[in-house]
Amino acid sequence: MMINNMAQPIIGILFLIGMLLKFTHLPGAGITIFVSLSCAIILLMMTLIQVRGTSLLTQLYKLAIVGGATYIAAVMFKVMHWPGATMMLVVSMPTLGLILVLSALKANKWYYALLSLLFSVTLIMALFKILYWPRPPYLLYGSYFGFLALLSGVCFYRGQSLSNNDSSLSKHYKLLGGIALLSLAITFKIKYYPDLFGIGIYPMRILETFSFAAIVTITYKLLNNKPYSASLEKDHQFLKTTQGIFLIMLVLMVLVNAD
């Protein structure tokens, strides 16, 4: 556990450096991203070995780890133009989407369920776009915009409802809501107004990547540094799902180019 806690921030920083190099067209991007993704796969495999238990929830968690590792490997293979990338994407992305659907079925609030369902649609449509398969128009960005807008609203709502009981968690929720709203505005500009304010796509891609990283960092901090009572267990599950979704988005950014 200590190794994981030390390695995750280092891998994250290395990955962000690689993405910064990628979007600024500087040398070293490929090797930096390759090393960070390789380390992420190793870390996931180490986590998988440590998981114990035979319950359905444990098996689902193991499947999520395997699916995540396969997804990261697929993106890495795609970037390196190695054979097998397409097959791994076809297997891993629907698997992660299915896990999100199953988590939605377990959610006791409609908005938590809808968040997972919306992103599962986004993930499948992203696969269709990556592989140049025919897809319904506007479904990719429609589901993604809906996800970010709802996420922002849920975070602000939850932050306000916790303002009298847990001021720290309340502030973090509101911060998450603000970053989600910023991500929505960035993606909307990139998609529909790429030259607005004279700011090109690549600077906005950098900002978008760092907004995802900020959400992952905040959720990581809340999940690892804060004890959760039974009454806040739903918050723990929500934050864990949100962290997983934005980790998926961060890795997906490796394949993103100007639309």
Image (cartoon, rainbow, N blue to C red):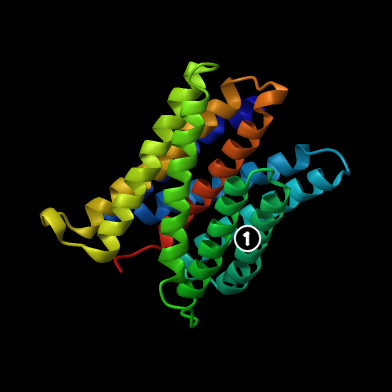
Q: Quadrant of residue 153?
A: top left
Identified at 29% across, 52% down, the residue is 186
Horizontally, residue 23 falls left or right of residue 133, namely left
In the image, residue 134 lies at what x, y percent?
Answer: 48, 83
Q: Which residue is mark 1?
A: 97
Between 144 and 157, the one lying in front of the other is 157
In the image, residue 213 lies at what x, y percent?
Answer: 42, 41
- For badge 1, the amino acid type reads Gly
Q: Residue furthest right?
A: 54
Which element type, helix, strand or loop, lies under badge 1? helix
Could one spot residue 113 in this view of the protein? yes
Crowd band around label 1 with a 10 angstrom C-alpha radius: few (<14), some (14–19), many (20+): many
Q: Quadrant of residue 179?
A: top left
Could one spot residue 21 in this view of the protein? no
In the image, residue 70 lies at what x, y percent?
Answer: 63, 59
Identified at 51% across, 32% down, the residue is 158
Horizontally, residue 154 falls left or right of residue 20, namely right
Horizontally, residue 189 falls left or right of residue 72, namely left
Identified at 68% across, 55% down, the residue is 99
User: In the figure, 13 relative to 35: above or below?
Assistant: above
In the image, residue 59 lies at what x, y percent?
Answer: 81, 49
